[in-house]
Image (cartoon, rainbow, N blue to C red):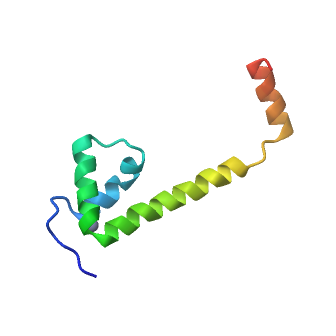
């Protein structure tokens, strides 16, 4: 694997920032540097897309969860429905 070391931030830094990057919590400058890094670094690109896929799977699993009837009743009562 060829890694071009022209980026200013290290792989460990990018991988630490991956979560914040997906949450859009990075400053524009930091995000730009992360994206710039991933353009040259296959390992970090894979890392971020793996985290993205994992999150997507967790989100769709949560959406498929059955809400227990008693919880739904309680929620309706709380919301006045
Ligand atoms: Zn990297």
Asked whether, in this view, residue 23 is left or right of residue 69, the answer is left
On the question of residue 11 being in view, the answer is no
Q: Residue at point 46% right, 60% down?
A: 51
On the question of residue 41 being in view, the answer is yes
Residue 69 x, y percent position in the rendering: 85, 38
Of all residues, the one furthest to the front in this rendering is 39
Reply above or below: 74 against 15: above
Of all residues, the one furthest to the top in this rendering is 80
Judging depth in this view, the residue of 16 and 51 nearest the camera is 51
Tell me which corner region of the image, top left, top right, bottom left or bottom right, holds residue 7: bottom left
Asked whether, in this view, residue 24 is left or right of residue 34, the answer is right
Reply above or below: 26 against 76: below
Q: Residue at point 59% right, 58% down?
A: 57
Where does ligand 1 appear, by image quarter?
Answer: bottom left
| Badge count | 0
Q: Residue at point 33% right, 56% down?
A: 16
Q: Quadrant of the C terminus?
A: top right
Tell me which corner region of the image, top left, top right, bottom left or bottom right, holds residue 41: bottom left
Q: Quadrant of the N terminus?
A: bottom left
Asked whether, in this view, residue 19 is left or right of residue 74, the answer is left
Residue 75 x, y percent position in the rendering: 76, 28
Reply above or below: 69 against 37: above
Q: Residue at point 51% right, 61% down?
A: 53
Reply above or below: 31 against 46: above
Residue 68 x, y percent position in the rendering: 82, 41
Residue 61 x, y percent position in the rendering: 66, 54
């Amino acid at each position: 694997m060829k890694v071009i070391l022209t980026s200013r931030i290290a792989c460990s830094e990018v991988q630490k920032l991956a979560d914040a990057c997906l949450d859009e919590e990075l400053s524009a400058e930091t995000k730009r540097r992360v994206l710039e890094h991933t353009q040259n670094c296959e390992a970090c690109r894979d890392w971020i897309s793996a985290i993205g896929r994992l999150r997507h799977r967790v989100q769709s699993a949560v959406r498929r969860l059955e809400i227990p009837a008693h919880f739904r009743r309680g929620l309706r009562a709380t919301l006045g429905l």
